Amino acid sequence: MQKTKNILEKLLFVSRWLLVPFLVGLVISAVLLMIKFIEKLSHLIIDIRSLSEIDIVLGVLSMVDLTLIASLIFIIVFSSYESFVSKFDSINYEDKPAWMGKVDFAALKMKVIGSIVAISSIELLKVFINLKNYDEQEIQWKVIIFIAFVISGVLFAVMDRLSSRQNHN
């Protein structure tokens, strides 16, 4: 019985490597975002003389959005790899971001929800800058969704705070 248990535990422990293809897929999705970013940037550069101020601001906000999403992807990739798969032993210490190795699952959830709120606030800002292209119902739904994200973020933070207090006691 103990031998079977040991084999099962080893199998489960090795199975953590099944996460790696998912993480590689996220890195590939970051490459796709980079291509879209370059496309938007080149459009702004090429068409700068014919674009209005609002068009430029909307373009820049779209690029900020893509950057936040790409940053979130890498936080998830690095944190998930270090939390669930293996440590980054071969990384040069000077180049290693300060947060690497310090983001546990609870902190990762907070970073994800914080990023989602930031991304949705940029989307909402783009709507308010360009109100004429949205009808009232669309704007209402976008505001409701944004408020739902903010409330979720606050609730996650409160739950995390309560959980950490209980763990310390």
Image: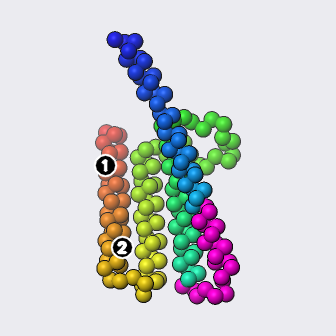
Left of 158 or right of it: where is 21?
right
160 in relation to 169, above or below: below
Mark 1, residue position: 162
Identify the residue at horizontal 40%, vertical 21% (top origin): 8
What's drawn in magenta, residue-wise?
34-54
Q: CA distance from mark 1 to mark 2?
A: 30 Å
Identify the residue at horizontal 56%, vertical 80% (top origin): 57
Any mark on residue 142, and which?
2
**Amino acid on which the number 1 mark rests in the picture:** Leu
- Which quadrant of the view contains residue 50? bottom right
Give the camera-side residue of 43 and 141: 43
- Which quadrant of the view contains residue 67? bottom right
Dot 2, crowdedness within 10 Å: few (<14), some or many (≥20)? some
Picture coordinates of residue 85, whole percent (x, y): 51, 35
**Amino acid on which the number 2 mark rests in the picture:** Lys
Q: Is residue 61 magenta?
A: no
Identify the residue at horizontal 39%, vertical 82% (top origin): 134
Any mark on residue 61, and which?
none
Observer-side mark, 1 or 2, equals 2
Picture coordinates of residue 12, whole percent (x, y): 43, 27
* Circle nearer the N terminus (1, 2): 2
Picture coordinates of residue 25, whole percent (x, y): 53, 48
Classify mark 2: helix, strand or loop.
helix
Main SS of the magenta segment? helix
